[in-house]
Image (tube, coloured by chain):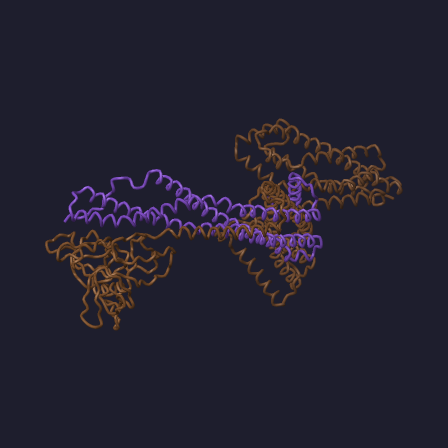
Chain colours: A brown, B purple
Amino acid sequence: MTDSGGEEPPSRPETPDREGRVPEDKWLLHQRLAVRELIDTEVSYLHLLQLCAKDIRSRLPQLPQGDLDVLFSNIDDIIEVNSRFLHDLQETASKEEEQVFLIGNLFLKFQEELERVYKVYCATYDQALLLVETYRKEPELQREIQSVIEAAVPQAGPSGLSFLLVIPLQRITKYPLLLQKILENTLPADSAYPTIQRAASALQDVTTNINEYKRRKELASKYNKVEQLTLRERLARINTHTLSKKTTRLSQLLKQEAGLVPRTEDKEFDDLEERFHLVSLCVTELKSNVAAYLDNLEKQRLEGLVWKPLCNLARALVGPQNLIKKRLDKLLDFERVEEKLLEVGSVTYEEEAARHTYQALNSLLVAELPQFNQLAVQWLGQILRTFMALQRDLAQQVLQRAEGSLAQLPHSQVSEPAFKKLVEETLGQNGNQLQSFQENFGKVLPPPTIQPLLPGAERQVEALLSRHGPGKLYQVTSNISGMGTMDLTLLRGQIVALLQDKDTKGNSSRWLVDTGGHRGYVPAGRLERYHVAPREEGLGGYKGSCDDTQCLMPEPTPAPASTLPTITQVVAVYPFVARSSHEVGVQAGQAVTILEAHDKKGNPEWSLVDVNGQRGYVPSSFLARPPSPAPWGWNLPS
Amino acid sequence: MIPFKIGQPKKQIVPKTVERDFEREYGKLQQLEEQTKRLQKDMKKSADADLAMSKSAVKISLDLLSNPLCEQDQDFLNMVTALDTAMKRMDAFNQEKVNQIQKTVIEPLKKFGSVFPSLNMAVKRREQALQDYRRLQAKVEKYEEKEKTGPVLAKLHQAREELRPVRDDFEAKNKQLLDEMPRFYSSRLDYFQPSFESLIRAQVVYYSEMHKIFGDLTQQLDQPGHSDEQRERENEAKLSELRALSIVADD
């Protein structure tokens, strides 16, 4: 066979069956190179990681520990996993023929670990970047960091920290590419081929999962906090984008409600949500009830062991609650997009993103809610049990103290029902005793200051009252003996009405008064304002003796009677000469019996009396209660 | 005419010792009155607080029971039912306790306190009688100092006659109170003894029931013998487990 070109690659003149092998050799060479690359890069990668972890991290003491944790995250774990990985990788170098096969297996073996470890790192990466930015803003700090980095890793360049921090991310995404390269240079017939293929796709999955995980975490932290926005901030947030979002959601919801559009039923999720809802209801209720209970009972332990955990649990509820709400919103978005997809057949990028968001949220919740519910219920159970135990302990404490006191009491041996009876009896006795005390004190005789009025006098008072008004009534505080012709002689307790508070000469200590029958002057000092008092004052009598009168001395009534005993035994103060057959004469100091304290017409100025058997009317004002000592009778006008 | 002035008698009509005794006894009783009132108020507050606490305890278990969570979880249901039974029984005992205290402590306290108004009135009346006595005594002394003329003698006689009943009245009141007051005061010990005993017994009964009920409950449901630190650690563990979930916000 002649070649047209004349120039043939040196491999061409080879026999056909060598022809097959030459590409194989070439491939083999490339494959070897690819494997070499894998191993070499792994070595340098690990070296860099170790530099970061050891030299750089420890030389940045000016950064707080929290920051360092965020920046370098779980770099130690990564180092650990990758060291082992590298070690195994290097071991395969000795087994030439099977190397590729072994490498493939190795990747498969490490797949899970890699995913687990890099997942965490990647999730915190964004936060780490934010931190780096803040450092950049402080030139002093930035310089220090930069110098440390340059000392350890000169090739880091001016963007030292961010350059270093991104390396693990780069590495984990490189693995699939490296594997792919090896795959390309491996013959399909090679026994290692399927392994490598699997490994490549496995590592690809790892990357995808890591991204997904990161995404979910972002979503969760974006939505699970309750945003405390001021009204203004809320308003600022409203723009056309959000408005359109909300309106489309609303219309979707309406369509669902109206039955126009089938709702995407997710039974599993609904059940989960319901259970979650119950759990949260339980927790919040319990929390408020325990609060009320605590108000009435103060207890240190109760607070720490029951109340605080409850509060924590309640707080933990907030996150999932918000996420569930958000999911519902996203669901509406999702459904709309699905609709559109059916109608139109394609969706925009945004809509696609919305779909993904919903799916991500949903799967996150479905995955984690059961766990949450279970944990929450378990915890609730724990809290309740603690509560019970605390009650028991409280009871024990009080019981001990109470029993101690009880032992000191006389009746501690007595059984309960017997004691109750005993107490009742004693109390009954005590009650009686108290009663007697009360009576005794009541028996302390009321003083004879305000004398109860004679029945006749009372009418007299009423007459005076109507004639002069209540402000003018005065009562005589002690017996008045009138000296002059115009002076009145009055008994203590008698009621008069004031006519003038001075006499004709202007002497204000001499008042002109009206007794209802007579008018005259009395010393002002003997008069006291009289209030028409209710008739409840007990009657006590003088326990005095009147030895030189003709008056009768009725026995004083000691009991604090509330009713006024009608006074029938009285004494005539002035002599009275009967002027008609209806009237009867009396002498001064004579004892008479009142039969009626008014005349037939009801006039209180006259009283029907019995004088030694004779009956007739006498002026009521001539009568007085008997215990008044007669001595003043000395000055009676006769 | 010489207007009378209400003067003070020259001689001390009530000996100082008597007056002092009276003051002392009455003072003690006034203190006792104050204390009785305060004790009454405190007992009432305590009884109210007891009732309120019991009610809120019952609410805890009642609400838990009505939560549908119980239907879904058998273990939970058992626990909550047991707790509810316990709470209801405790409430019943509490009610009994409060009733007993009401009967044997609060009522007697009230009765004791109701004697005081009568006592105070009686003391007032004695005071008034004393004033009258003083006044009339001064009057008599005034006349006694004057020249013994006819009208003067007449007035003196009259004044003496007026004085006598008033003095007797005061003496009677004074004696009565001086007798009764110490008796009343010393009666309080015997009076309150059964009440306080009853109070303590009621507490003992209640708390021993409570101890038994909750003791049984914890035996049934809890791991007894858990120390406080253990419980706290369990709580912390649960909290961190929950927090590990991404759906839970970190605060």
| Viewer-nearest residue: A297 or A573 | A573
Rendering coords of residue B188 (x, y %): 48, 45
Measuring 57% from the left and 37% from the top, which residue is drawn there? Answer: A131
Q: Image quarter for residue B234?
A: top right
Residue B26 visible in image: yes
Rendering coords of residue A519 (x, y %): 16, 61
Q: Residue lying furthest top in this view?
A: A151
Count of numbered circles on the image:
0
Q: Residue lying furthest left in this view?
A: A505
Rendering coords of residue A353 (x, y %): 63, 53
Residue A215 visible in image: no
Q: Quadrant of the C terminus of chain A?
A: bottom left
| Viewer-nearest residue: A485 or A104 | A485
| Viewer-nearest residue: A533 or A128 | A533
| Viewer-nearest residue: A316 or A571 | A571
Is residue A60 shown left or right of residue B137? right
Q: Quadrant of the N terminus of chain A?
A: top right
Rendering coords of residue A84 (x, y %): 76, 34
